[in-house]
Image: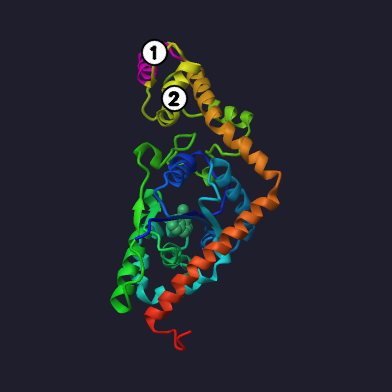
Amino acid sequence: MKNVILTGDRPTGRLHLGHYVGSLKRRVELQNSGKFDEIYIEIADSQAITDNFDNIEKIRNNVLEVALDYLAVGIDPEKTTIFLQSRLPQLCELTFYYMNLVSVSRLKRNPTIKEEIVLRGFEESIPTGFLTYPISQAADITAFGANVVPVGEDQLPMIEQTREIVRSFKHYYDDILVEPEALLPENEKCNRLPGLDGKAKMSKSLGNCIYLADSEEEIKKKVMGMYTDPDHLRVEDPGKVEGNMVFVYLDVFATEEHFKKYLPEYNNLDELKEHYKRGGLGDVKIKLFLNNVLQDILRPIRTRREELSKDMDKVIKILIDGSEKARKRAQITVDQVKDAMGINYFGE
Ligand code: TRP
C-alpha cells in the first residue's frame, strides 16, 4: 500500500505561531522525511464556507495568504501538492454518495460539531452544509487514498467519521477506500499553543496571536505585552512559571543554542525557571529573551514570505497546477467509487 498524506486548513485567516508549532513545522518534516509516496495539502475553502456563507469575503481574502504561509514555512510544491478544495468537483461528488452512509443523529453526536454549533449560535437552525462538513472531510481524505492525516486533537472526530464511512462503504459496496489514521503532534505542548493572554488557544478571533507575517516590531510589541505572573510585581519577588505565558512559550521554542546566543549566564530553561521562582529575575529580561528566540524563528519565514509575495502570479500558478494534479487523482477514486456502487452503467 502507498503511504499517502492528506491534510488541510480552512482559509479563514493568516496562519500564526500556533499553526506553526501545531502542524506546519511537522508537515515540513514529514515532507522531507522521504517516507511518503504522495503528500497533499488542501486549502479547504469550501469547508470554510459552511460557517462563513454570509461572509465569503473573509475566505477570498485568505486563500492566497494561507498559500503564502505554506510556501514560506517550507512546503515545497515539488514534493507536496497544494490544492484548493473548490477546484475539485470530485469532492462534492463523493460527499453526495457518502451522505447516504451517515445518519443525521450520528453527525449531531460529533463532539467537534457539537462544540462549534454552540460557538456559532447555530442551535436553532443548523445549516445542512455545516452539519455535513465531516462527510465532505471524509471525501477529502478518501479521494486521495490517504492513510495518514496529520491533524490536531480537535480533528479526531473527523477521522473517526471517515473511518466509519470507509467501513460502511465496504459493507454495502466494496473494499476500495483506505481507512486513515490521524497523526497527532508528537509533543503535548505543541498541541494547543495558548494565546499571548493565557487564554485557551491562540486564535484569530481572540486577537491573541503572533502571525507568521508579523513584522519584527509587531512581534516585539506582542511579546512585551504577554501575560506573565500577575503577582510578580517587583524584580526581587518570587515568580510563578506555571501559567506564565513567557515560560510556556520558552518551553516550546527555546533551545540550548538560544541560551548560548542570548542568555549565556544560564545553561538552560530549568536554570532560568529556578531563578525566576527564587526571585530576582524581572519580566523584561525573560520577555526580551523570548523576543530574540521568536525573532530567530520567524525572521526567515517572514523574509521568504515577502520574497514570494512579490510574484503572486507564481503563487497562483502553484495553486492552479496543484489543483489540476489533485483533480486527476481524485477522479480515479470517483471512478472506483462509481464502479463499486454499480452506477457506471455503460462500462466506459
Ligand atoms: N477541518 C480542518 C480544520 O478545520 C480542515 C480540513 C479540511 C482538513 N479537510 C481536511 C484537515 C482533511 C485534515 C484532512 O482545521
Magenta residue check for 145: no
- The residue shown at (37%, 66%) is 108
- The reply to whether residue 127 is in sight is no
Q: Tell me where residue 162 appears, x and y as whole percent.
A: 36, 64
Which element type, helix, strand or loop, lies under badge 2? loop
- Residue 213 percent coordinates (x, y): 61, 39
SS category of the residue bearing label 1:
loop
Spot occupied by residue 179 in the image (x, y as percentages of width and height) = 33, 63
Q: Which residues are magenta?
A: 270-282
Return the residue at label 1.
279
Q: Is residue 102 visible?
A: yes
In the image, 296 versus 135, the foreground residue is: 296
> Looking at numbered disc 1 in the image, what kind of residue is underneath it?
Gly
Which mark identifies residue 89? none
- In this view, the residue farthest toward the left is 171
Precedes in sequence: disc 2 or disc 1: 2
**Rendered image coloring scheme:** rainbow
Majority secondary structure of the magenta segment?
helix
Give the amino acid type for the residue marked by disc 2 in the picture.
Answer: Pro
- Residue 163, image quadrant: bottom left
Residue 321, by quadrant, is: bottom right
Query: In the displayed structure, would residue 181 be above or below residue 166?
Result: above
Residue identified by numbered label 2:
230
Foreground residue among 347 and 125: 347
Which image quarter is the N terminus in?
bottom left
Residue at the image position 35 percent from the left and 53 percent from the top: 182
Identify the residue shown where x is 57% and y is 61%.
Answer: 323
